[in-house]
Amino acid sequence: MRYLTARKRAEGKGAAHTGTEHHWYMQVSAVGLAFMIPVWMYIFGSTLGKPYEEVLETFSHPFPAILTGLVLFVGMRHFAKGAQMMIEDYARGSMKKGLIMLAISISYAVIAVGFYALAKIAL
């Protein structure tokens, strides 16, 4: 006979059996964004209103380009996971599946368009 505590039986058993994974992903990405966004805002804000050539010059350097790509990717994945959790809470059936697919598709589309634009600027 195995002895399992109530905590051991409940570990990782959210409504979709992935609640802990979602929670930790959201926590880690939120902390990462909390450090990246202020630095990115400073870089982006310093180029705002500048001539086109100066903006190209700024984002052609590796650090601003990589940071912009990271903010874009981590931010959109954070959005997709957050939207998925919200949809799981409030929608049911095939509507839930469709909305989750839509949220994930939107996030990947924004990432793809953003990376394309960043590559055109940085390269």
Image (cartoon, helix red, strand yellow):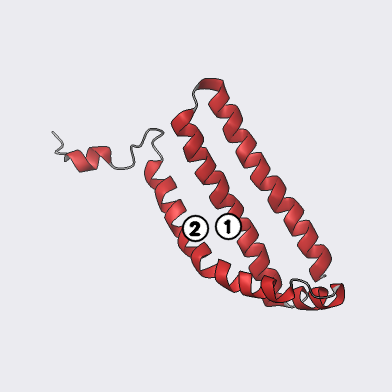
Residue at (64% x, 69% y) in the render: 67
Q: Among all residues in the image, which is located at the extreme top? A: 93
Residue at (69% x, 52% y) in the render: 111
Residue at (51% x, 69% y) in the render: 35
How many neighbours does mark 1 have within 10 angstroms: few (below 14), some (14-19), or many (20 or more)? some
SS for dot 1: helix
SS for dot 2: helix
Q: Earlier in the sequence, mark 2 or mark 1?
A: 2
When asked about the image quadrant of residue 100, the answer is top right
Q: Among all residues in the image, which is located at the extreme front? A: 49
Q: CA distance from mark 2 to mark 1?
A: 7 Å
x then y, percent, for residue 90: 47, 30
Q: Is residue 92 left or right of residue 51?
A: left
Q: Is residue 109 left or right of residue 7?
A: right
Disc 1: which residue: 74
Residue closer to the observer: 42 or 91: 42
The amino acid type found where label 1 is placed reads Val
How many neighbours does mark 2 have within 10 angstroms: few (below 14), some (14-19), or many (20 or more)? some
The amino acid type found where label 2 is placed reads Ser
Q: Quadrant of the N terminus?
A: top left
Verify CB contact (< 8 Å) between mark 2 and mark 1: yes
Residue at (54% x, 27% y) in the render: 96
The circle drawn on residue 15 is: none
Disc 2: which residue: 29
